[in-house]
Image: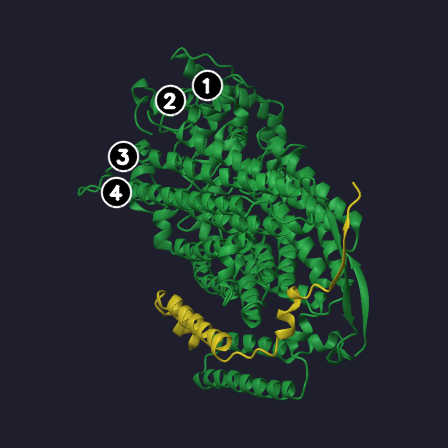
Chain colours: A green, B yellow
Amino acid sequence: MTTRIERVSYDDATVRKFMLASIIFGAVGMLVGLIIALEMAWPELNMGIPYITFSRLRPLHTNAVIFAFVGNMMFAGVYYSSQRLLKTRMANDTLSAIHFWGWQLIIVAAAITLPLGITTSKEYAELEWPIDIAIALIWVVFAINFFWTLARRNEKHLYVALWFYIATIITVAVLHIVNSFELPLSLTKSYSVFSGVQDALVQWWYGHNAVAFFLTTPILGIMYYFLPKAAERPVYSYRLSIVHFWALVFMYIWAGPHHLLYTALPDWAQSLGMVFSLMLWAPSWGGMLNGLLTLRGAWNKVREDPVLKFFVAGVTFYGMSTFEGPLLSIKSVSALAHYTDWIIAHVHGGALGWNGLMAAGLFYWLAPRLWDRPLHSKKAADAHFWLATIGIVVYMVSMWIAGVNQGLMWRDQNPDGTLVYTSFVETLLAIRPMYIVRAIGGTLYLVGYCVMIWNLLKTIMGAKAVNTTVEVTVGAEAEEDKGVGPMAVIAGRPLWFSIVALVVMGAFFYVDNTILAVGLAIGVLVVGEVAYIVNKRERAGGAASWFGLIERRPFAFTVLTLLAVLVGGVVEIMPMVMSKQAVPTTGNSQKPYTALEQQGRDLYTREGCYVCHSQMIRPMVAEYLRYGEASRPEEFIYDHPFQWGSKRTGPDLHRIGGKYPSLWHYTHMMDPRSTSPGSNMPSFSWLATWKIDPALAPKKLALMQTLGVPYTQADIDSAEANQRKQAQTIVADLAKSNITVDWDSEMVAMIAYLQRMGRDQGVVMTEDVPKTAAVIGGEN
Amino acid sequence: MFKQYFANMESTAMPLIALWLFLGVFVVVALRVFVFKTTSDFATDAQLPLDDGTAISTREVKS
């Protein structure tokens, strides 16, 4: 085998830019997080300004942390490690530059549009369609640059970190494209093509796997590269990393429905999501153990090296989060924890612990190398470590307590079967101290982060940025690869044995003959044994393993990864989307929203009401007593997009329609604490003065008609007139209590939507609801 | 026959079967990785992050 020496100059400038962007946006994202944490405890802090209200800032916080902080950090890690693992420079500097600046422009666009209320309301996918298209294009640029680099590589073997990057790139593309299927109304407004249950399933298939393939797999790739580097020893078990990778990418995609337990989602899909979530525990902990065991014999370094310190703590938090995730996916646990702050504790264990600490470790590793100067202060890094760790613990413990406490209070019943805590606000007041403690924990974490920024600034200020040039030994194609073409991959025995085994297993479950079934079972075992013996003999003779062939062929590897990822999504989503029976469409009792209600619904999504209010009453006694009849799938068939929510900082609103008079809603939105003393809802007083665009009503109905909502042409033609007529009914009702609002004010449209919710018999007229002002001031 | 057998099965039995299947595979994988491990197969691959080549320079970037 011949070899040659090649000089390679790495593109470290792009790594530096991504790293600095991550540090800056991380500070912004965490600061916004702290602001909204304070607003949870002191709702007046929004000062009546719509753009800094909790429900608009919360999507900004999540997007900033996920896509700006972790996204840029991930790209820095991917660009740095991929070049070194492939022993080549990134394929194209222009593509790298487009990727970097394009991604930052997307972040800026998000920072502008989300506070303005320009949102799709789909969690972690709130950005509107023009930005969605930009994300897709920039992601394709990244993919082309990455796979082009793979094609030009000087190292045949694809190290495990690169597999995780491949899985990230292809899966995020699939998730983003499918979940962004929407029909535009204007440049700043679109509607999901999916509705109700289907929309919820697609959204949480995306939402869960955004966590999996944006916040987890690329960071695992970074762990597999940087942890051995920092520990100066190879990963504990490469074989375990293979199992870890394939099991994780296959199983993760199935677990999305655990976000929808006890909802109107069909039970089979819920159970499937739960079972796969439980199974996920094994590969997740396999990866965690592989990371921690890499430090066998090197634990003394952890004491001295800030990089290892952060990596070890990060991986440990990964283990904790991936234990807690399956636990929360068990239906009986979810019944208590869902919609509570326990979930907030869980996600911040992952975000602050796993992502945040891994990012810090990465920055402490990169800065001295990219600027060729030692870290300014190890003591400051230690201080950062302890501030961050204590901050996370304070944050998580307070949210665990708040979550379990509130969950128990919601379901607490007297011996006579009535609720102990009839007012939702009672349960909120009980956990308010925990909201303050949470803000303290977040502050500690942010202070630690600022210490890191200071430390890194002191390290790089005055230092010269450097690009590394190395000489690498490039091997000619390995002997074992000679004459081995793509057919060897397709004809590989493990692949065919797997296919045969799956077919035989399928047949086993469907045959009607005992002897045949036993024969099939024995057949699988015999084929397995034969395959094992043949493979062992061939390997003893020096033949390459089938997996060895795969991991040296990026195309084959990518195709197999895509197949592993797609199976779960196809099995879960396709029946729901394709089957007419999946969701009953009892059109006789279900009427589309009126023009005014649709306008109000759009305001509901703009203001982010779904951030704090669910629209999904679960089939539980306590929920029936508090909110009314459990939600049914057919009630959401015209909901583009669905508004089920994932957290109850306020009560469920699915059956709020008709519960209170319009006066109550007006007063509540102007001053929430006047109707619900102790509530932490911010005032939405601007709704009383801001105006809807009446001319949009027919356009909205026509677009909904395109999406399958059964509006007639007459409905569309008379939309403006009907809208005004319905609004004037509400205006007249409010006028009886000396409240004056314009018929085209946003407040009236919002009240129309709220009064309609959960009343699937059609439009709720104000005569149907109690008008006594005595209701005002009652509990909600 | 098997179709009928599964159709009449208590629904609680299905997750138990799945769990036992899962645990079986888990134990086999764990034994293979931790007990019957062979280090030679992937030793070269595992060393890849540690092979940085020979550093020629850390070239200063023009500001």
Say which residue label 3 marks: A422
Residue A518, image x and y in percent? 45, 85
Q: CA distance from mark 4 to mark 3?
A: 9 Å
Percent position of residue A528, x then y: 54, 83
- The secondary element bearing badge 3 is classed as loop
- Residue at the spot of label 2: A664
User: Disc 3 and disc 2: Cα gap in Å?
Assistant: 18 Å
The residue lying toward the viewer, choosing from A23 and B4, is A23
Regarding residue A193, the answer to whether it shows in the image is no
Distance between the alpha carbons at the discs numbered 2 and 1: 16 Å
Determine whether, in the image, residue A254 is placed left or right of residue A653: right
Q: Secondary structure at mark 4?
A: loop
Residue that badge 4 annotates? A412
Circle on res. A729: 1
Crowdedness near tag 3: few (<14), some (14–19) or many (≥20) residues, C-alpha within 10 Å: some
Q: Earlier in the sequence, mark 4 or mark 2?
A: 4
Q: Secondary structure at mark 2?
A: helix
Q: State which tag comes first along the sequence, 2 or 1.
A: 2
Q: Which is more foreground, mark 3 or mark 2?
A: 3
Considering the image in quadrants, where does the N terminus of chain A appear?
bottom right
Which is nearer the N-term, disc 3 or disc 2?
A: 3
Q: Are marks 4 and 2 in contact (CB under 8 Å)?
A: no
Q: Which mark is residue A314?
A: none
Identified by mark 1, the residue type is: Thr
* Of marks 2 and 1, the one in the foreground: 2
Q: Single out the mark in the foreground, 1 or 4.
A: 4
